[in-house]
Image: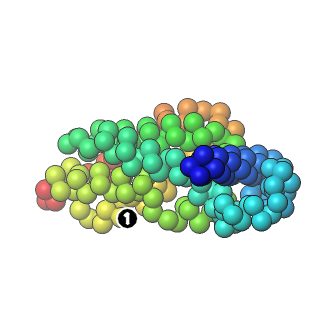
Amino acid sequence: MERRTRRTYKKSAVTRQTILEAALALMKEKGYQGTTIREICARAGTAVGSFYSYFGGKTDILRALYADGDAYFATVVRAETSGPDTGEALRRFVAHYARLNVRTGVETVRVMYTPDNEWFARRKSQQEVLEEIVRRGQESGQLTRRLPPERVVDDVFLCLRGVCYDWCSRGGSYDLEGRMLECLELLLPGLRPGPGEK
């Protein structure tokens, strides 16, 4: 019985990965909107019913793409940004965010930049880790308290995603990490405490 369960699990994992890879390949070719579930299943060599055994719809494909990054931020990045220097923690966070996008690849990141991507609006490990950095910075007097931490996180992500979108639109033709770090340096003065705030 145990052998059968292991085989079934392995087969399920392989089928799920095959569907995920087929979906991603099609979305790179045709865009998110232009890809249908029937096409994904045809490319993966599976029945439409198999797709729904693993995913609730196309948005679940995008969720699967975020899963590894979320795990990475929840563990590695959280540990590397826990120091007392808020500026340094923010720089490390931004560097990791840029590297994650570069590793994911410009074509895959383009797939994620769709108006139907509900995962942009959801708070994930990335936002949680950044909020921890901001809260520590505010508590230690290194960052302004004029804005709530959630607003600072939203504003930083607006900037980072804007740079990432530009990088995608230019085919990944420049150093994403360098550009994101430059933008952070422009933001930091506005995030510092104002006169009489300390």
Of 185 and 107, the residue lying toward us: 107
Would residue 172 be visible to someone looking at this image? yes
Residue ranking furthest to the front:
1
> Residue at coordinates 33% horizontally, 46% vertically from top-left?
78
Residue 41 picture quarter = bottom right
> Residue at coordinates 42% horizontally, 47% vertically from top-left?
73
Mark 1: which secondary structure?
Answer: helix
x, y percent for residue 20? 69, 50
> Residue at coordinates 42% horizontally, 55% vertically from top-left?
125
In this rendering, the answer to whether 112 lies above or below 102 is: below
Tag 1 residue: 151
In this rendering, the answer to whether 166 lies above or below 172 is: below
Residue 82 picture quarter = top left
> Residue at coordinates 63% horizontally, 56% vertically from top-left?
62
Of 65 and 117, the residue lying toward us: 65
x, y percent for residue 193? 22, 54
Of 41 and 114, the residue lying toward us: 41
142 on left or right of 124:
left
In this rendering, the answer to whether 175 lies above or below 26 is: above
Disc 1 residue type?
Answer: Arg
Would residue 166 be visible to someone looking at this image? no
